[in-house]
Amino acid sequence: MNIVVCVKYVPDAQAERTFNASDNTTDRENVDGLLSELDEYAVEEALKIVEAGEGEVTVLTVGPDAAADAIKKALQMGADKGVHVNDAAIHGSDAIATSLVLAEAIKKIGDVDLVVTGMASTDGTMGVVPAMLAERLGLPAVTFASELSVEGTTATIRRDGDASTQTITATLPALVSVTDQINEPRYPSFKGIMAAKKKPVEQWSLADLGVDAAQVGLDAAWTKVESFAARPPRSQGEIVADEGDGGSKLAAFLTERKFV
């Protein structure tokens, strides 16, 4: 079982995130970055599948030099090897271009039984790349899995909705995106941290993938940020002094704003 997990290096959600003033793209240099939290669930699920049988897990990312840290974290968790697509022309790419680069990289990896992704990235939160990627690869896409099992050549997921639960099966090779309900990602052990230093990581450019630079980047993007502004500071809430009538004042406050 050869599994490719697509991961993304994203700005820390706990940091003050902003955009570059020059081109309105996400500022990834002046903020700490890390492996997208939602992608950790994808890495963990791939590791569980391999550990239950046999095979290997390859971690794939697209991004600048610092994105190597996302691969490093996944290797420390237990992945076998990494592939880092790094090319200056990729800067500013939208979901469509990102899916193109990922698809060509997976084709170059070759002999893939299962592609696993998180349900979305924590910076873009679009959740569309998995379906786009599956379409480019010609694979069945089973998305938003809160449970995944692989038996023989069949992958089965459970997708939990607001009103129902679906069980969906697909014949391998396939692509599966997983939610944050599917497992509890492991912490890298000391042994895993040391072992990761010896695991192979390949660096590929767009030329290595046969992708024309004109197909990616900000100029080729279908979506762009036109402008941005800092979120206004929160205003101080209204304090209701309870002088025996606090309950009625609170009810009046909620009623006035149509909360009740």
Image (tube, grey):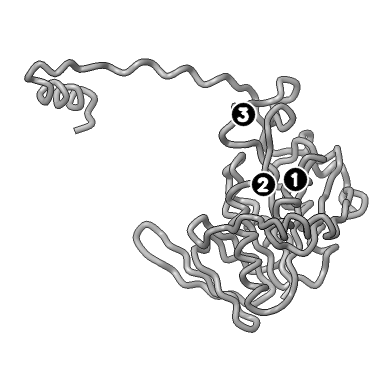
How far, Cα to Cα, is label 3 from label 2? 16 Å
Residue 25's place in the image compared with 36, above or below, is above
Q: The disc labelled 2 sits on which kind of residue?
A: Leu
- Residue contact at pointers 2 and 1, CB within 8 angstroms: yes
Mark 2 to mark 1 CA distance (whole Å): 7 Å
Image-quadrant location for residue 42: bottom right
Farthest-out residue, bottom: 152
Give amino acid for label 3: Arg
Q: How many marks?
A: 3
Residue corresponding to mark 2: 35
Q: Residue 251: in sight, yes or no? A: yes
Which mark is first along the chain, 1 or 2? 2
Q: Against 45, is 126 above or below?
A: above
| Closer to us: 159 or 213 | 159
Q: Which mark is residue 69?
A: 1
Residue at coordinates 81% horizontally, 58% vertically from top-left? 105
User: Which of pointers 3 and 2 lies earlier in the amino acid sequence?
Assistant: 3
Secondary structure of the residue carrying tag 1 is helix
- At 56% from the left and 74% from the top, the residue drawn is 149
